[in-house]
Image (cartoon, grey):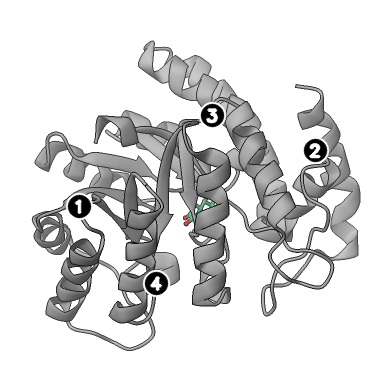
């Protein structure tokens, strides 16, 4: 999994004015991400609004991202779904399209036993035809809070090579680092990337990498060079932007930035995800100008 370490953009899903997935904008976005020198794409995650798409749309996004991104870096497909069967269908698509790995949130909404969740992940590995699986631990959204022992159980499944750890719990990050040598350990909250990297993460996946990829590359370079103070200065510049994004809704605000940067044609999100409200525009325009100047 060495190839999977590094910084991967959690790819957004652009729509056209009618609200359909926009293939041309998706291609432009994939190109824009790799132009920033990022190591790969996390396709169809939370940031890709995947749970608001149909299975066919999710497959289409996988296909377009692969066509545009193949050879540019790692391709990780998020296949998590409410049903094991749907997750398996998506995992098979990723395998057929030549993805490097699949990843999945646990099955949400119905309250399943830990054994059922384990079976879900094993079934995805089975369908992924040899692709490695990266667990996606995101308790704030999934509502499922794994203990270290429960994560250990899932990480012991054949085919599971890593975890995308989207929590502020840096103690658990360090415990995963310490307890699982060689584990692919990816940081999930961009505003905590420095903390994650110094706690043992060997890379990260983030929504704001879509627009600040070069800053995060610089941050990681400084950490690897031992310059934590320098890395903190870069993290602070990122977080000044993230503060504004969080205030207005990360996904609609990010889409607006991509729109202002000329990468996508409409800043829409899919309902019930809210699109941007008027008051945000001035501050986001200033951020877009700042990023365009870098
Ligand atoms: C995903 O699947 O797209 C991700 O989880 C990417 C990581 C993002 N997490 C969530 C829950 O959205 O980039 C982060 C996040 O948007 C950012 O740190 C702002 O909080």
Front-most of residues 141 and 12: 12
Front-most of residues 47 and 284: 47
Q: Mark 1 points at which residue?
A: 130
Residue 66 horizontal side relative to residue 117, left or right: right
Callout 1 touching callout 4 (CB < 8 Å): no
Q: Residue 142 carries which label?
A: 4
Front-most of residues 68 and 201: 68
Q: Which of marks 2 and 4 is nearer the N terminus?
A: 4
Q: Residue at x 39, y 72 (%)?
A: 142
| Tag nearer the camera, 2 or 1 | 1
Tell whether circle 4 marks a residue whose Cβ is less than 8 angstroms from ligand 1: no
Q: Earlier in the sequence, mark 3 or mark 4?
A: 4
Q: Which mark is residue 216?
A: 3
Above or below residue 36? Residue 101 is below
Q: Which residue is drawn at 52% across and 24% down?
A: 217
Q: Position of residue 168 (x, y in %)?
A: 39, 51
Q: Mark 2 points at which residue?
A: 287
Q: For the residues marked 2 and 1, what is the alpha-carbon distance in whole angstroms? A: 42 Å
Q: Which residue is drawn at 39% across and 67% down?
A: 90
Q: Give the quadrant of the N terminus.
A: top left
Q: Earlier in the sequence, mark 1 or mark 4?
A: 1
Badge 2 element: helix
Q: Earlier in the sequence, mark 2 or mark 3?
A: 3
| Tag nearer the camera, 1 or 3 | 1
Above or below residue 145? Residue 114 is below
Badge 4 element: helix
* Circle 1 Cα neighbour tier, 10 Å, few/some/many (<14 / 14–19 / ≥20): few
| Tag nearer the camera, 1 or 4 | 1
Q: Residue at x 39, y 62 (%)?
A: 93
Q: Position of residue 52 (x, y in %)?
A: 57, 75
């Amino acid at each position: 999994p060495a190839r999977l370490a590094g910084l991967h953009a959690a790819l957004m899903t652009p729509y056209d004015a009618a609200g359909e997935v926009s293939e041309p904008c998706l291609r432009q976005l994939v190109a824009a991400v790799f132009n920033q020198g990022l190591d790969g794409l996390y396709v169809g995650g939370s940031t890709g609004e995947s749970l608001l798409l149909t299975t066919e749309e999710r497959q289409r996004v996988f296909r377009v991202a692969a066509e545009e991104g193949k050879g540019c870096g790692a391709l990780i497909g998020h296949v998590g779904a409410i049903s094991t069967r749907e997750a398996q269908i998506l995992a098979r698509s990723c395998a057929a399209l030549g993805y490097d790995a699949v990843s999945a949130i646990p099955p949400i909404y119905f309250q399943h036993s830990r054994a059922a969740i384990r079976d879900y992940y094993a079934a995805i590995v089975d369908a992924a035809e040899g692709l490695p699986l990266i667990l996606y631990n995101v308790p704030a959204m999934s509502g499922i809070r794994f203990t270290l022992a429960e994560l250990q159980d899932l990480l012991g499944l054949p085919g599971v090579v890593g975890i995308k750890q989207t929590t502020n719990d840096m103690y658990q990050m360090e415990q995963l680092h310490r307890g699982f040598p060689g584990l692919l350990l990816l940081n999930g909250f961009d505003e905590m990337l420095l903390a994650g990297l110094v706690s043992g993460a060997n890379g990260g996946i983030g929504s704001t990498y879509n627009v600040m990829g070069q800053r995060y590359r610089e941050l990681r370079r400084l950490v690897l060079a031992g310059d934590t103070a320098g890395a903190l200065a870069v993290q602070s510049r990122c977080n000044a932007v993230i503060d504004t994004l969080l205030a207005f809704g990360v996904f609609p605000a990010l889409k607006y930035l991509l729109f202002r940067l000329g990468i996508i044609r409409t800043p829409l999100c899919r309902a019930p995800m809210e699109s941007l409200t008027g008051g945000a525009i001035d501050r986001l325009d200033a951020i877009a100008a700042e990023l365009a100047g870098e």
